[in-house]
Amino acid sequence: MENFNQLVAIRRQKLQKIKNLGINPYPNRVKRTHTIGNLIEHKDKYLKNQKKVTVNGRLNAMRRQGKIGFANITDETGRIQLYVRQDEVGNENYEVFKLLDLGDFVQVEGECFLTQRGEYSVKATNVLILCKNLRPIPTVKEKEVDGEKKRYDEFSDIELRYRKRYLDLLLNPGNKRNFELRARVITAIRSFLDNRGFLEVETPILQSLYGGANARPFMTHHNTLDIDLYLRISIELYLKRLIVGGFERVYELGKTFRNEGMDRNHNPEFTLLELYQAYADYYDIMDLTEDMIIHVVKEVFNSDKIVFQEKEISLKKPWKRVSIFELIKEETGFDASGLNFERIKAFCEEKDIEIEPTAGPGKLIEEIFKTFVESKLIQPTFVTDFPKEISPLAKSKPGNSELAERFELFINGDEYANAFTELNDPIDQRERLETQSRLRELGDVEANVVDEDFLEALEYGMPPTGGLGVGIDRLIMLITENTSIKEVILFPQMKPE
RNA sequence: GGUCCAGUAACUCAGAGGUAGAGUAUCUGCCUUUUAAGCAGAGAGUCGAUGGUUCGAUCCCAUCCUGGAUCACCA
């Protein structure tokens, strides 16, 4: 640290020297006639017309040789070399140039030309400091070998990259791509839904009761009302209230919070898309989900497939639709469709699947599915016929009241969406939530709570409705070929240092 | 939470039971077409933390901290 402090102290001294020259190292106003990208794009024009240009950027390389110096500056659009001569900028300005450090922001006026080595550069007539950097930025150097960029001393410590994301973005500009793609995915989702007549809404994140998923919440406290509040674990119950209120197509894209374990698929706050469509069922939602993801990938990559670590995933319709029981049977030979608790339990014991005391047959079926089937589902697959027991907000299936009209979408072995034909029978819904409540009393900390206000809304009548939830971070991981959620969240949760 | 791996200079890394090294960055000097500029010199580290073993620990052992991988748990 001592050394680091010395490096900082040297920069502070330079800052003082700049001030002593009567120069403001943090000026308010900036002149910029061209972006660097523009200079590069119209290279021939600027070489020919020898017009004066003014560019801004951050210094990220410096090669001084006595009375001349070369530097590279970068703005968001590109990088260009500066050529600074003492006899061109004058002695005073050259003194300022000598006080610059890597990481400083500068404004440079000059004209474009080619150096003897053929490098397109700006020959400076004036160099102005826009912001003095006080902390040395880790050095990353690049060399082009056969058109390929070779990097030296890359800023690659994963922990540092997440904790100091600004340095990661600065030093590994390639990592900006994940976040640019993220923005484009979200834009594409919005335009898709907007075009289909969905209304984007915002519902409370602070809730006095949480629900819509099985998860443990974060708690907080409101001082004026002197009540505990929860951060939402899903958006479901409020969007359904809006369907009761007469909106027929609504969606919300927003942060949701679950107080659970963290790993490469889980961050405590994550982005969820939920949508509800009146007069639709889960078959309609399957169609919609297919169309939406196809639209997104088409918008972002102009492609109808995704390549994830050499696995090619085709998005061509129709996607496979298959019952969870069929998949289990295919993988294990075990037929669980009778929902016979004793038989299923025996199978789980045989396969060493842990059985929680509150688990019923449905829960065990889900466990069997996760253990034997999930990772095999590479191509997009709608898994249907989830047991009603583990689907307390979904309508049951005509002809088999123990199953729910619910699907989960699996791609590349991970779950991307969860959807139901929504339960709109208020009496049935009350019974389901009360069952959940009993499970909670038996020790299932993630069981749903009874939300009287939601039940009351249902009693006023919710039309038949199809609903969908999509984990957006995971969708972006899939599209950007990342295996850690931390790579697609700008500031992932970390333990305090 | 279990298991495994990692933590050494600002960055990327080497090292070894005897008190710490390289490249880059930084500083000084030389240098008016360089581009991982060059040449010469210099400074810079509580070797993640705390205990233990030892004449001596950064190295061996234990515990802890942080991160990663994986398993478990989890919508």
Image (cartoon, coloured by chain):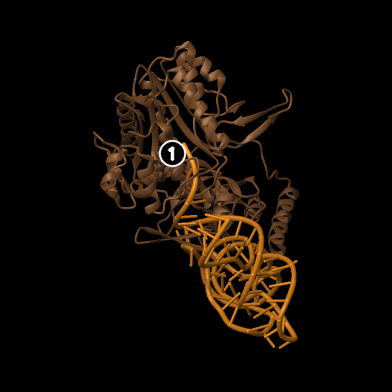
Chain colours: A brown, B orange
Q: Position of residue A349 (x, y in %)?
A: 40, 51
Name the kind of residue labelled 1 in the image. Gly
Decide: few, some or many residues near mark 1? Use Cα within 10 Å; few <14, some 14-19, many ≥20.
some
Q: In this view of the protein, can residue A139 be seen by the observer?
A: yes
Q: Position of residue A46 (x, y in %)?
A: 42, 43
The answer to which quarter of the image holds residue A396 is top left
Residue A66 appears left or right of A45? right
The answer to which quarter of the image holds residue A468 is top left
Above or below, comparing residue A142 to residue A112 in the picture: below
Quarter of the N terminus of chain A within the rendering: bottom right
Above or below, comparing residue A210 to residue A129 in the picture: above
x 44%, y 44%: residue: A178
Find disc 1 in the rendering and name its residue.
Answer: A360
x 55%, y 29%: residue: A449
Q: Residue furthest front?
A: A342
Q: Which is more toward the observer, A445 or A288?
A: A445
Q: In this view of the protein, can residue A201 be seen by the observer?
A: no
Residue A182 appears left or right of A306? right
x 55%, y 52%: residue: A161
Q: Position of residue A425 (x, y in %)?
A: 43, 18
Q: Mark 1 belongs to which subunit?
A: A
Q: Which is more toward the observer, A388 or A496?
A: A388
Residue A464 appears left or right of A153? left
x 54%, y 58%: residue: A157
Q: Look at the numbered disc 1 and give the secondary structure of its residue.
A: loop
Count of marks overlaid on the render: 1
The answer to which quarter of the image holds residue A232 is top right
